[in-house]
Every structure is written in structure tokens, then in C-alpha cells.
Image (spheres, rainbow, N blue to C red):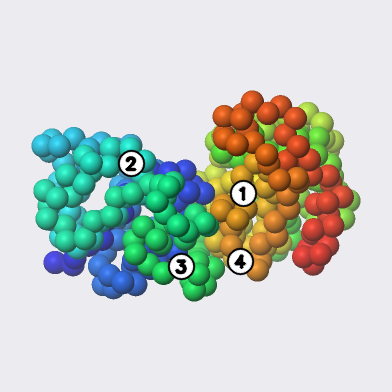
């Protein structure tokens, strides 16, 4: 029976993608083990499709809940994985003791349970913090390795583009107006100006709208004419198949931006209140644009800050960065 490696990461898309270098490193260290990821379903499917893990289970399903209920029966499939597990890692903030107890019940030889936000960690960049938790060295360039998608996924992406009127082979760029938090987003009028500027340069901008982006996109559409093509609520695997065909992707500090960068797509990431030294996608193919440094001491202060001077990024600044990166 093949031995296993079990990874628990309940975070949002960008948070999980920042952990991919650590997952890859663990896969190399525990070569030959099958990797199970317990995460949000759409993220798990994406990482299986990209070959980063072998199998996934839903964090919101019986398996995820059962991990924290000491003495409660676990689903049979999860029990099988834990019975043949050589190492388990959980990157989370809460219920760490309960999870450690579950892992001990299965006599797993190596267990790491720690939050990447822990103040005891010394690494700065979030990807390096995941590596530090699992006792891996940082800064050797592995974090810049690109993830590949299969030709079948690219074909799915092409079919989706054709459904909104973009023929196969037509050059286009992607713009993602949203983020996991509205406090990380440019003003709608700025995004509209960027989209119109891209259109005037013949770059054919296409807007991405995820499940949490409806209001952000609506506000942009209120101030732009004509309306650009919009890709709405795509499965992450289909989005990956579209991203790899784009000339570049422009977004905020978001999961979509991190996915584009991980796939090796030329990426322009606009940062405001979050620190790019900690949260930026890595790689020479990534261009960071930011306003003045955020002076808010906490995220509560960011929420209460209505002026958002850290997001005072002008359209000219965006296009200067695009030109410097050779993207226009």
C-alpha cells in the first residue's frame, strides 16, 4: 500500500497558492508518497488538475469537521489516508490542539501544526513562512517554479473564450477588478480608465469576475462604455486554462493574481494596504505597482480608513509600469 502525506489548508485561493512551494518541497522530501490536500473544494480540484497533489477532500465536508472532533468516527476514506500517513501538516490558526490529538491517534511519525501568521516565525515572505514551518530552507528559487496545465485544460479555456466571442488565437489581456477584500482594490473609475486605455492600445481587455467580485465589477461597468467582455464565476481549472493564453493579467493582491503568476503568466499586481515584501507573487515575470506605503497599524485601521492613500495609483503609473515591463 502506497504511503501518504496529508496536508490541511483551509485558506482562500491566494493563501493556498503561496503554500505551493512548501507542498512541492514536501512532495520531493517524501518522494513516492501520495499527497492528500484537505482544502476548499475548488482549490483542491485545481491543485489536483495541476499535478501538485494527488487527491483532495473538502474542508467543509465530514472529513474536515471530523479532524477536530476527538473520538468521533472519521469518513472511511480519510481514515485510510491517515492510517498510511508518514507526515501531516496543517497550516491554520484555530483548534490546533484538537488536530494534533487526531494525528496522534493515528501514530503519524511527523506532524506540523502551525499558523503561517505565528509571531515566532522569522521568515518575511508568506511562502517562506510555510517553508519554515515544515523545516525547509528558504530562498533557493524553488518558489519561482511555474505550474503547468494540461492541453485539455487549455482547450476548455479556449471553448469558454469562444462562448463570449473571443476566437482562438486572438490576443487578449485579463483585468481582475476584485480581490478578497474591497480594501485592497483601486477605485472603479481608475479600473475603468485602465480598461479603456488598454482597449485604445489594441490590447483587447477581458474582465474576470469571481464569486466575490460582483459589486466590484458592477461599479466598474457603471462608469465604462462600451462594456468589455466578462468572464463570470469560472471554475478555477477553466480560469487556469484561460490565464495561460493571456498576454498578461492585471489585478490586485488576489488569488487570481497569484494563480496567474504561478502559471508563469506575465502579471501586474497592484498593492495597497498589504505589504508586497510579504504577500507579492514571486518571479521576474511579475511587476508590482503600488501607491504610498500604508501607514495603518492594523487591518481594523485599514477598514476604517476611507481615503486609502496607499491605493492612490494613477492610470499613468499603471501604463508606465506596463511599458517598462515590455507589455505595451
Which of the two residues, 125 or 236, is positioned nearer the viewer here?
A: 125
Determine crowd level at label 2: few under 14, some 14-19, many 20+ residues with C-alpha closer than 10 A: many
At x 33%, y 43%, the residue is 58
Q: Which mark is first along the chain, 4 or 1? A: 1
Residue assigned mark 4: 283
Q: Can residue 167 be seen in this view?
A: no
Determine crowd level at label 3: few under 14, some 14-19, many 20+ residues with C-alpha closer than 10 A: some
Residue assigned mark 3: 138
Left or right for 230, reference 150: right
Residue 325 at x, y percent in the picture: 77, 65
At x 82%, y 31%, the residue is 223
Q: How many labels does the image show?
A: 4
Q: Which mark is first along the chain, 2 or 4? A: 2
Residue assigned mark 2: 59
Report which quarter residue 310 is drawn in.
top right
Label 2: element kind: loop
Q: Which of marks 4 and 2 is in front?
A: 4
At x 64%, y 26%, the residue is 304
Left or right for 174, reference 321: left
Amino acid at each position: 500500500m502506497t504511503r501518504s502525506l496529508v496536508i490541511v489548508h483551509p485558506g482562500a485561493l491566494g493563501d493556498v497558492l503561496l503554500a505551493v512551494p512548501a507542498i512541492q518541497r514536501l512532495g520531493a522530501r517524501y518522494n513516492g508518497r501520495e499527497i492528500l490536500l484537505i482544502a476548499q473544494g475548488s482549490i483542491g480540484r485545481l491543485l489536483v488538475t495541476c499535478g501538485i497533489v494527488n487527491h483532495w477532500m473538502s474542508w467543509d465536508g465530514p472529513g474536515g469537521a471530523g479532524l477536530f472532533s476527538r473520538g468521533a468516527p472519521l469518513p472511511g476514506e480519510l481514515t485510510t489516508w491517515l492510517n498510511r500517513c508518514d507526515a501531516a501538516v496543517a497550516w491554520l490558526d484555530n483548534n490546533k490542539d484538537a488536530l494534533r490529538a487526531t494525528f496522534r491517534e493515528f501514530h503519524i511519525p511527523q506532524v506540523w501544526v502551525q499558523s503561517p501568521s505565528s509571531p515566532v516565525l522569522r521568515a518575511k515572505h508568506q511562502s517562506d513562512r510555510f517553508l519554515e514551518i515544515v523545516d525547509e530552507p528558504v530562498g533557493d528559487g524553488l518558489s519561482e517554479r511555474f505550474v503547468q496545465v494540461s492541453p485539455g485544460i487549455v482547450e476548455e479555456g479556449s471553448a469558454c473564450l469562444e462562448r463570449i466571442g473571443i476566437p482562438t488565437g486572438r490576443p487578449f489581456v485579463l483585468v481582475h477588478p476584485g480581490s478578497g477584500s474591497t480594501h485592497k482594490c483601486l477605485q472603479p473609475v481608475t479600473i475603468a480608465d485602465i480598461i479603456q486605455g488598454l482597449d485604445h492600445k489594441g490590447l483587447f481587455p477581458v474582465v474576470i469576475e469571481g464569486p466575490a467580485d460582483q459589486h466590484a465589477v458592477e461599479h466598474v461597468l457603471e462608469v465604462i462604455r462600451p462594456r468589455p467582455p466578462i468572464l463570470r464565476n469560472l471554475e478555477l481549472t477553466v480560469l487556469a486554462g484561460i490565464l495561460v493564453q493571456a498576454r498578461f493579467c492585471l489585478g490586485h493582491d488576489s488569488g487570481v493574481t497569484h494563480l496567474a503568476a504561478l502559471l508563469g503568466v506575465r502579471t501586474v499586481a497592484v498593492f495597497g494596504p498589504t505589504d508586497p515584501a510579504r504577500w507579492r507573487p514571486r518571479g521576474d515575470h511579475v511587476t508590482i505597482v503600488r501607491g504610498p506605503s500604508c501607514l495603518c497599524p492594523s487591518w481594523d485601521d485599514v477598514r476604517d480608513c476611507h481615503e486609502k492613500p496607499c491605493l492612490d495609483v494613477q492610470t499613468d503609473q499603471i501604463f508606465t509600469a506596463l511599458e517598462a515591463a515590455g507589455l505595451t
